[in-house]
Image (cartoon, rainbow, N blue to C red):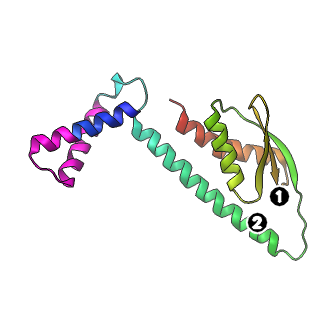
Amino acid sequence: MAFQILLNFFIASVWMFMSSSMNARTFIVGYLIGFLLIFMMRRFFKQRLYIERLWATIKLTLLFFKELTLSNISVLLLVLRPNLNIQPMIFALPTDLEHDWEITLLASLITLTPGTIVLYVSDDQRTLYIHAIDVDDVDDAIDSIKNSFEKAIKEVSRP
């Protein structure tokens, strides 16, 4: 991925020098030409195009902001309710993530979402123990995390 970005910047710089124009517009045109060349030669690269990983990162960020907003509203409604009828729970979330940074990112995203916090990561790094402020069904909570955050992290990190 880093090679593709550097190659794209190199092509844009060469385009600027060949055009004898050192301004941002010429660089952007060269960058787009470079991206088009990289796109046409994508079968020669071992990894997927860097723009796909960038798009997956943007989707993960938007997913986090959506979940952050929805959980803020949920916690606000719990607090404003006249009678506090909640079911706090600690549950184990088995994860398929392999790298330390993926597990750290998942734990951070869960903890930053109001109403949930990661209490412990098992020694083999295959299970996260999560406390949630109000859980009706543990299986639904696990499926929700696996189908949102974990799936999006896999899209960003997997080749």
Asked if residue 115 lies left or right of residue 17, the reply is right
Residue named by callout 1:
133
Q: Taking 106 as reference, is 115 above or below it?
A: below
Residue 61 left/right relative to 115: left
For badge 1, the amino acid type reads Ile
Residue 48, compared with residue 62, is above or below; it is above
Q: Which mark is residue 12?
A: none
- Give residue 101's position: percent from left, percent from top: 61, 37
Crowd class of label 1 (few under 14; some 14 to 19; many from 20; radius 10 Å): some
Q: Which residue range is magenta in the image? A: 13-40
SS under mark 1: loop
- Residue bearing mark 2: 75
Q: Was residue 131 drawn as part of the magenta stretch in this picture?
A: no
Q: Is residue 43 above or below residue 116?
A: above
Image quarter where the N terminus lies is top left
Q: Residue at x 83, y 47 (%)?
A: 138
Residue 46: image quadrant is: top left
In this picture, residue 112 sits left or right of residue 89: left
Disc 2 to disc 1: CB gap under 8 Å: yes
